[in-house]
Every structure is written in C-alpha cells, then in structure tokens.
C-alpha cells in the first residue's frame, strides 16, 4: 500500500548529543535528498559524506544513507541523515527536509507505514514501542522476541488451523453435491477444541505480559511508624518518602518504579492503617485500602517492637509479611525479618517478592513472549466464539450456525496481527478440495 506523500521526522531525542538523525520516507525521499545534499554520490545502502544546504547556506556536515524500496524499515524509499546533535542544528536539518517537500510525520507514522507495506504485523509494530519503553532486561527480551515475530508466528499458526476448519465446513455447506467429507463427529469437534486449547495457552500469558510492560503493582501497608516509608527508600536506594517518628506523616500514596531481579515493580507506599479523627489522614487511609485492593502483591510491614501488630488481620488475603526493626527486637518472629536501619534481610525480602510473582508457572518467564491487553481481548473473543461453535455442534444445529461462530473466531484471531480475511477462505476451499472435478 504505497503512500502518496513523503514524511520526515527527527528520530533521535531532542537535546544535545553526538548524533542527530533525520529520517525521510516516501516516494520523493531520494529527490528531496538530492535537492538538499551536496557531496558524494547517493547510492542504495551506501553511506555518503557531504553537507546539507538550504537557502542560507550550509546547515551541517552529515552522513547520508539511502535505503531503496522495498528493502527498508517502512518498505518505501528511505533516506537517513546523520548530523551533529544539538537543538538548533537538528531542527534546521529537519526544517530543510520539510522545505524541500516532505511533510512532518505524525506519531508512529514510520512504523504504521511499515505495517501497511507488510514489513511488520501488528504485534511486531506494538513491540517496537515496547522495546523502547522496556525498563528491565526481561521486558526488553520479551519485546525483542515479539519484534522477531514470536507472537505473530503463534497467531499465524492459529489462523491456519482455523482457516482449514472453516474452509472444510463451508465447503460442505456450499457444495453439497460434491464428494466432500463433512468431517463431522469427534474429528471436527477435536480440531476445534485443540485450537481452543492453543488460544487458552496464549491467554494464560496475559498477566505476565502486563507485568513485563507495566510492572507488578506492589502495595506496602501496615500500621503507622512500622517503617513503610523507610522500606520504600531502602528499596529505591534514595530518600523518596519523608520518614518521621510522628504517626500519620504519610497521608497520600507515593508510587515509584523499581527493578527487582529483572522484573519491573510499581511500588506504592501507603498511609498507616488506623482509625483517626483527622479528615485528611482518613482520606489517606481510604486511598491506602484502595491501593491494597488493586495491588498484585501486598507487602505488610510490622514493627517488631509492636507486639499488638502481630495480631492484626491480614491487609489482603495473600500477602507477604515483613517484620521490621529486628535490630531493636531480634527475637524470632513469623514473617521475613528485616531492618530498614541496617539493611539486614532486604535481599531475602526481594527474593521473596520475586518468587511471589513467579510462583505460578508461566510461559512468559521462560520464553519471554507474552500477549498484551489488546491481544487478550481479541483472543478472548475467539475463545468465546469457539465455545459457541462447540455448543452448536453438540446441539446438532445446522452447520451454517457452526460456520458463523468459526468465522467470528477467525476474524478475532486475525485482528491480533491486523488481518481480517474475506477472500482467503474461498481461496482455501478451492485450493484444498477438488471442487468441480
């Protein structure tokens, strides 16, 4: 799907740096380069040294590289201009390209063109931003696997299986006089349920995908002065939260990002849980309880010198318990013994938090590939459609109704990679069966 216009954008962050890269893509990119570049011969996949010029003279000395279509990121003619980094010079380089006929690119437009030109499927396009935003090595590895087509390959295999099933059922419907095996009974039902199981395995990675992309929501809770803010500061390695012996110092939730053993965490320090006449502190307690309800992992901190706190009911049904201030009360206590003052036990606490996240066997941790929320919604619709198809089949309804649900599943799976078939099924029918022999 070739574009009619040519776009340009600064592809490196604004500010000072060694290099600034201006990227131009579209049918006129080479003509624009020849207009503004003075120097060596421009040849595909070769770097040329020269100068970019505008009406006022030389803008910068640059290295220009031309990638001829379709062997480029976008599948179009692409020119990349590498100049000196800096706010003024990079802006002038871009402005020179725009003045020569390019249009300023919109957000994600280069990757959108790569998708439209068949260089990437939708899962790979999404992986580009996941890779840029990755905050841990594990998240980066998952994004790289997706960019290489790991999820796309799984979805393509699912589509192929569904296409075969739909084609067979619709061939039986559309050509009743031909000698086509209807493939009814246990065989057809088995093929549908096998496909449904494959979808279920992908759906099982949704939580791990959310964690890799967004982080584990970890709420730190407990009584006032238990050491929650001190623990947050210790985990972060900086004084992020105010620490004071005055109860009720923390009155709002404080959220910070943290990397533990390659897994991103969103750590939320909450107000101390207690009954209080102070209206502002009561609001803080309310927000603390809301953070606890929305957390993936709840870490309850107990002051080792506060014996009454040991009898408090759990803040959440499944929480990690940390006994703080063991430097003041070293007697054995239930839970993980830590000291925010000395750092004792913090490594063991980090291990326990990571183990809590990893304790359910999940494909994502082993293969570094996990679906995102959009994939999950599409695949869930496909799974629901297959459930309906199986119910229709078991009820011995007309095959047309089964085919409708199978098509719905096929469309939903196709949405994951950006493909919704219309003519493919008919092509599969005529390609797989000897119609009209």
Image (tube, grey):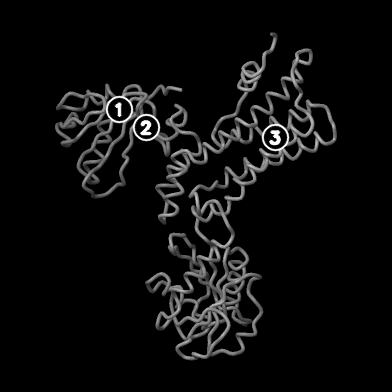
The residue shown at (25%, 46%) is 87
Depth order, front residue of 184/324: 184
Q: Position of residue 20 (x, y in %)?
A: 25, 42
Judged from the image, the secondary structure of the residue bearing numbered disc 2 is: loop
Judged from the image, the secondary structure of the residue bearing numbered disc 1 is: strand
The residue shown at (48%, 62%) is 265
Q: Position of residue 373 (x, y in %)?
A: 57, 47
Residue beneath disc 3: 191
Residue beneath disc 2: 73
Q: Where is residue 131 in the image (x, y as percent from the top left)?
A: 41, 47
On screen, residue 206 above or below 218: above
Q: Is residue 122 rendered to the left or right of residue 307?
A: left
Q: Spatial distance from mark 3 to mark 1, Cα to Cα? A: 45 Å
Figure quadrant of the C terminus: top right
| Of the two numbered discs 3 and 2 in the rendering, the one whose residue sits closer to the viewer | 3
* Quadrant in which residue 178 is drawn: top right
The residue shown at (55%, 46%) is 371
Pointers 1 and 2 in contact (C-beta within 8 Å): yes
| Of the two numbered discs 3 and 1 in the rendering, the one whose residue sits closer to the viewer | 3
Give residue 67's mark: 1
């Amino acid at each position: 799907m070739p574009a009619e216009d040519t776009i340009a954008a600064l592809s490196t962050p604004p500010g000072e740096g060694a290099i600034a890269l201006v990227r131009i893509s579209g049918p006129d990119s080479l003509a624009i380069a020849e207009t503004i570049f003075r120097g060596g011969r421009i040849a595909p996949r070769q770097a040329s040294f020269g100068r970019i010029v505008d009406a006022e003279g030389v803008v910068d000395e640059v290295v220009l590289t031309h990638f001829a279509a379709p062997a480029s990121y976008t599948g179009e003619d692409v020119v990349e201009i590498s100049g000196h980094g800096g706010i003024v010079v990079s802006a002038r380089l871009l402005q020179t390209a725009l003045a020569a006929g390019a249009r300023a690119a919109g957000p994600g437009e280069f990757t959108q063109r790569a998708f439209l030109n068949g260089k990437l499927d939708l899962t790979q396009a999404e992986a580009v931003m996941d890779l840029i935003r990755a905050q841990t090595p594990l998240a980066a590895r998952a994004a790289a696997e997706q960019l290489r087509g790991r999820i796309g390959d799984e979805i393509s295999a699912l589509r192929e299986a569904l296409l075969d099933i739909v084609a067979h059922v619709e061939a039986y419907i559309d050509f009743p006089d031909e000698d086509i095996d209807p493939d009814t009974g246990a065989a057809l039902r088995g093929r549908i349920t096998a496909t449904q199981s494959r979808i279920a395995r992908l759906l099982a990675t949704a939580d791990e995908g959310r964690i890799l992309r967004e982080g584990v929501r970890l709420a730190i809770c407990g009584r006032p002065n238990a050491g929650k803010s001190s623990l947050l500061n210790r985990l972060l390695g900086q004084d992020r939260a105010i620490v004071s012996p005055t109860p009720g110092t923390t009155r709002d939730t404080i959220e910070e990002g943290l990397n533990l053993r390659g897994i991103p965490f969103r750590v939320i320090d909450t107000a101390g849980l207690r009954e209080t006449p102070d209206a502002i502190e009561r609001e803080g307690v309310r927000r603390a309880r809301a953070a606890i309800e929305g957390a993936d992992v709840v870490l309850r901190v107990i002051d080792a010198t506060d014996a009454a706190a040991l009898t408090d009911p759990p803040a959440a049904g499944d929480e990690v318990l940390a006994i703080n201030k063991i430097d003041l009360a070293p007697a054995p206590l239930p839970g993980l013994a830590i000291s925010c003052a000395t750092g004792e036990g913090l490594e063991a606490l980090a291990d326990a938090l990571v183990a809590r996240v990893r304790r359910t066997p999940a494909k994502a941790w082993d293969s570094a590939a996990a679906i995102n929320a959009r994939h999950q919604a599409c695949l869930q619709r496909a799974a629901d459609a297959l459930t309906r198809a199986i119910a229709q089949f078991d009820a011995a309804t007309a095959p047309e109704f089964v085919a409708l649900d199978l098509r719905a599943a096929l469309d939903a799976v196709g949405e994951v990679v950006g493909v919704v078939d219309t003519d493919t099924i008919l092509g599969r029918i005529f390609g797989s069966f000897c119609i009209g022999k």
